[in-house]
Amino acid sequence: MDEQKTISVMVVDDHPLWRDGVARDLAERGFRVVATAPDAPAAVRIARAVRPDVVLMDLNLGELSGVDATAMITGELPETRVLVLSASGEHSDVLEAVKAGASGYLVKSASAEELVDAVNRTAAGDAVFTAGLAGLVLGEYRRMAATPDEAVDKPQLTDRETEVLRLVAKGLTARQIANRLVISHRTVENHVQSTLRKLQLHNRVELARYAIEHGLDAEPEV
Amino acid sequence: MREMPTVPGMVARDDPVAPLWRGTVALRVVTFLFAAVNVTIHSDEYLRPWLGWTVLGVMGLWSAFTVRSYSAERGRNWWVVGSDLAVACGLMSLSPFILTDEQYLRLVPLVTTIWACEPAVAVGALGGQVAGALAGGVLGLSTYLNRGEMTVDVVRDVVLLVGAGFVVGMASTTARRTAVRLARALRTEAATAERERLARSIHDGVLQVLARVRKRGLELGGEAAELAELAGEQEVALRSLVAAAPEESTVDGEADLRPALQLLATRRFEVSTPATRVLLPAAAVAELASLVREALSNVDEHAGEDARAWVLLEDLGDEVVLSVRDDGPGIPEGRIEDAAAEGRMGIAKSIRGRVAALGGALELQTGPGEGTEWEVRVFRAGDGGAG
């Protein structure tokens, strides 16, 4: 509980019902809810000021989406982690958010215990995967491998990473995977995390390359 | 079209018959040059050469005017086209004052010659096949009156004039109808896209509320927990529906396997797919979807009501891998074989049969306490040899 108390959380959601509900749930369980925000611009602005440990991010925010806010927040605040909390399931926008820098995804109907666990793991730097997200990430690596583009170094999964990700997508818990592959729980977590990190790094390189090609590489605002 | 900014305005704003008008303009220029040569050759013998040259001059001016008019949409109207027809007939009727009787006998062309056929084409472009044919008829009648007798040449001219007006008119009508249909299709498409966007935002709102109700209800317990369960079921059903994008089959009869699987998701059954389409022949899509449905109902029957299952769809390019895993007690060793030996239509037989029919491969992993996992591999056509 001591550890939980130190974790500061910000909740971004356009539905007040949900925003306040989650904030209350987390506060009741010992998290410090330092801010809430109803839309992406406010989320970015407030996150800059309060620098929370974890941002719970809804993706359907209107004009500027949760994906944009995720990219801006994780780009500017390396210490802050974003956990996507979406009601509408594992769509491509969840994949986009993860590529933009989110550390994981949880469906909104997850139980309070699952949410608490996910926030703790996110704060600790782990990746929070659902089976659906693992399926999306696997698909994304394969899509990149199948797209002919010699200009870039495409990220690839190691055999072990593919194996782990497939088991996550088939609903096995980290512990079950560790047992099946006879590796440590920590190693499983590291593999999962690594699949995300490679994807995010590639995404950042791609964005930078796009910016340079299109003459957008002026001094970045800090 | 102003209220439809998403529709490419070009299609509706541009005259769909514009190419026909460009052709009309070209015809006018070419036929005028022909008429100029004709007058130059025959003017020496004309009854009144000065009148021949004057008519040619008027034809030149009128050609310039109509070329300018027909080049812009504003000038393509009944006033200009009607005048065009009248001017052609009028100038033609001056022929008896220009050509000598001897020239008439030699069948020297009237002073307006083929220049006069252009109004039939213009009327056809503007008013469709009936108007075009009528204009051709008027010009043909005028030719007959100015020739003074019905010869084979005159009949041929009449047929050609009526035919030209009719054919161009038909092309014009078809082009207009196609343009109207295209505009309507584009409008429908834009409206559908807008409705989908609205539906998404409404669905999101409903999902939010259902998720919240379920969460809070379970915490409150008792009767609220029952309501929470109901809300939870509807939440999953709606989420699957939203995830399953409308089916879109390609021209060669392939379909996306993802929507068919996503609709099978429930609170206990999770479906994982790539973010991009997984295309297979439509028949294979239907077969695989019913195979998964069967495997899931088998989970319901044999793995207990609390068992969960995960469906994973992977696209490896030359093959598609579909796995269904449950966390039930598993199938004890030998039971599948027993079932088959006893002649009961076991799940294994049915699934094996379906996979074999698709030319795929099936792998079954199970054991007491380990759950059951089916893995189906379907090879894409063109790589058929691989399987």
Image (spheres, rainbow, N blue to C red):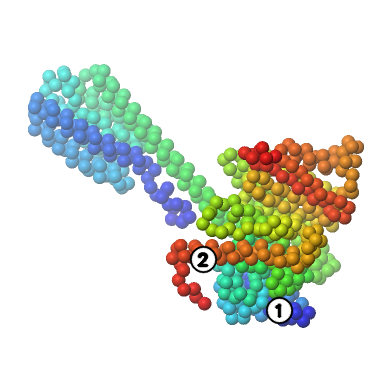
Residue occupying image coordinates x 81% and y 65%: B225
Crowd tier of the residue under label 2, counting other residues whose Cα lies within 10 Å: few below 14, some 14–19, many 20 or above = some
Q: Secondary structure at mark 2?
A: helix
Q: Is residue B279 above or below residue A29?
A: above
Q: Quadrant of residue B80?
A: top left
The residue singled out by tag 2 in the image is A208
**Residue A143 as seen in the image, left or right of residue A187:** left
- Callout 1: chain: A
Q: Is residue A44 visible?
A: no
Q: Secondary structure at mark 1?
A: loop
Residue B346's spot in the image, x, y percent?
85, 41
The residue singled out by tag 1 in the image is A7
Q: Quadrant of the C terminus of chain B?
A: top right
Residue B146's spot in the image, x, y percent?
19, 25
Image label count? 2
Residue occupying image coordinates x 30% and y 33%: B120
The disc label shown at residue B198, or none: none
Residue B97's spot in the image, x, y percent?
12, 27
Residue occupying image coordinates x 26% and y 31%: B117
Residue occupying image coordinates x 67% and y 65%: A194
Q: Quadrant of residue A141?
A: bottom right
- Callout 2: chain: A
Q: Is residue A126 visible?
A: yes
Amino acid carrying mark 2 in the image: Ala
Amino acid carrying mark 1 in the image: Ile
**Residue A166 as seen in the image, left or right of residue B78:** right
Nearest the camera: B37 or B228?
B37
Q: Which mark is in front, 1 or 2?
A: 2
Q: Earlier in the sequence, mark 1 or mark 2?
A: 1
